[in-house]
Image: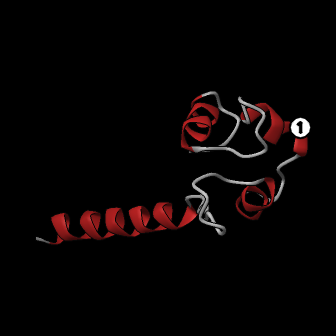
Amino acid sequence: MTRFFLPLVATMAFTGIAAVAQTMLEDTDGDGAYSYEEMLAAYPDLTQELFDEADANADGAIDADELAAAREGGLFPA
């Protein structure tokens, strides 16, 4: 039983750490998209140029589709 239990506990601990390490985005104004300031809170090293590259329709915000595309393209970590 110990052989099974210890790897299980280690896996659960690692999974918990990975979940905490995920980037948490918050739509603070509730408009359904992320402004530069909202993205900056989650990605402190974000530059305006990178934000503009992810903002495909150039409306000044990154919506869910743009965010998914940027993550798939490697601009932002998943």
Quadrant of the rendered structure where residue 42 is? bottom right
Residue under the image location 66 percent in, 67 percent down: 29
Residue 75 x %, y %: 70, 35
Question: Is 4 on the left-hand or right-hand side of 76?
Answer: left
Q: Of residues 74 and 9, which is closer to you in this image?
A: 74
Q: Amino acid at mark 1?
A: Glu
Question: In this view of the protein, which residue sits in the foreground, 10 or 45?
Answer: 45
Quarter of the image with the C terminus is top right
The answer to whether residue 6 is above or below residue 22 is below
Badge 1 local density, few (<14 within 10 Å), some, or many (20+)? few
Q: Position of residue 58 (x, y in %)?
A: 78, 33
Q: In this image, 2 relative to 65: left or right?
A: left
- Give the residue drawn at x 84%, y 53%: 45
Where residue 69 appears, as percent x and y from the top left, is 59, 31
Tell me what residue is drawn at x 73 percent, y 56 percent: 39
Q: Which residue is mark 1?
A: 49
Label 1, secondary structure: give it: helix
Tell me where residue 65 sits by quadrant. top right
Q: Is residue 17 above or below residue 53?
A: below
